Amino acid sequence: MTGARLLTLTAPTAEALERDTDELAEWVAALDATAFAGLPVVPDTGTTDQPARRAVAASTPRDAARWLRKRDPRRVFTAGPGRPANTAFLFSGVGDQYPGLGGRLHRGLPVMRRELDRCLDLLAAEEDLDLRPLLAPAESPGTGPDLAALFDRRATTQPIHETAAAQPLLFALQYALARALIERGARPTVLAGYSLGEYVAGCLAGVLPVEDALRVVARRARLIDRLPRGAMLVVNTGPESLRPWLPDGVSFAAINGPEQCVLSGIAEAIEGLAVECTARGWACRRTATSHAFHSAMMAPLVQPLHELLETVPLRAPRLPILSTVTGTWLRDAEAADPGYWARHLCETVRFTDVVAGLWRLPDPLLVELGPGQTLARLAQQHPGRPATARTPVVQTLPGQFETRTEDEVLLAAAGQLWASGLEIDLAGLAPNLTEGGHATPCDA
């Protein structure tokens, strides 16, 4: 076995936890790479009634020792007595996906592989959509991030960024990862989704079965793919500053926070607006999307989407969902209305209001299930975040330009959830990978 290892500590008091952490740091620092690789991927924590918990995931003894000594809060997760009153799953939209996303967990985590294979098989059989090649790793794995790709517009023409493939694949990946976490004990009490992510939230809440959700998402993506291409631009300023400068053909696709918006529309207009924003000192960047989501360019799809959704049995959610259309709690009548989901594609994503609603919950723990930490950063920077909020938001998948592997990020997430007081099956979330990146025989 190679790869990341999760180290955990429990203690009766905070003072004892600090002493034990110092001892663990010195012990792990004395290990060589072979001895570290010989450690179990996750420890057998059993059932503990000791209130103080701490966890760290690392791929080398040097990293583990350094983070433990510094108590680095980005890597070392600590919680006191009790468990979070609310666990919120957040599902992302398209834009941050990249080639090979989810592939390592698909190969090495049986509980996720089972759910993801189910989704991929349904898409292949019912929609003639083979997405498995997109799970293959990039051409040069392990060589570090390709920073040039961040500025290369041609990257948006890669298959993973084509709407017809990206949306159903991202839905399937997030759904499978959520099912894996739920099955192993990390059960949400609240759900929210950014754009496409709200379909994942609705599916998990029982608004529509996964078979119907996959069909709707795949056909919705194909309808979008037939529309003229567009562009989207993230701008670091508020909507009131931007509104006077919006040209015809550009809409507010999302309001992410008081000082961040996403604009969407005709590519030429977005290009001109990017120049204007830069001249005014507003940082901005294009997103890796092929179409102008949540803009007037999506309006021709409202009627065909409505007709498609009328064929699906929609129900009231069994878990509370924060709506990005209204910015408040999704009502039962809205969830069961095809019209709500049809206009969802054209409406502004009111994510800033969703985050405000999450932070108003008693003692919330936020878990991001899409790639990277886009939603986490927005949540942490939101002015409504209370000073007593748990930090950081739980990240479950690496971003495109991170050096950590998927198994290391997921192990860290499992450790953070456990340290927060959730009684989860750590062993069930330990990816089982060999040097070559293939799963070793084990049962789900």
Image: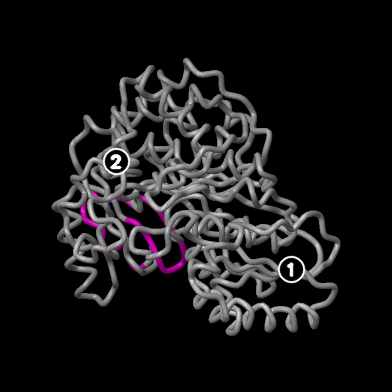
List the residue tagged with mark 2. 296
User: Which of 67 and 33 lies nearest the eye of the viewer?
Assistant: 33
Front position among marks 2 and 1? 1
Which quarter of the rendered picture does the C terminus lie within? top right
State the residue at coordinates (38%, 37%).
169
User: Which of 238 and 138 lies nearest the eye of the viewer?
Assistant: 138
Q: Is residue 144 visible?
A: yes
Q: Earlier in the sequence, mark 2 or mark 1?
A: 1
Where is residue 354? Give x, y as percent: 55, 53
Helix, strand or loop for disc 1: strand
User: Which of 147 and 291 lies nearest the eye of the viewer?
Assistant: 147
247 over 309 or under it: above or below: below
Identity of the amino acid at label 2? Ala
Q: Is residue 170 left or right of residue 81?
A: left
Helix, strand or loop for disc 2: helix
Q: Is residue 393 magenta?
A: no
Where is residue 21? Give x, y as percent: 69, 79
State the residue at coordinates (42%, 34%).
343
List the residue tagged with mark 1. 53
Q: Is residue 244 magenta?
A: yes
The answer to which quarter of the image holds residue 129 is top left
Q: Residue furthest top?
A: 311
User: Which of 398 and 354 lies nearest the eye of the viewer?
Assistant: 398
Q: Which residues are magenta?
A: 241-262
State the residue at coordinates (58%, 55%).
367
Q: Are marks 2 and 1 in contact (CB under 8 Å)?
A: no
The answer to which quarter of the image holds residue 276 is bottom left
Q: Is residue 124 left or right of residue 178?
A: left
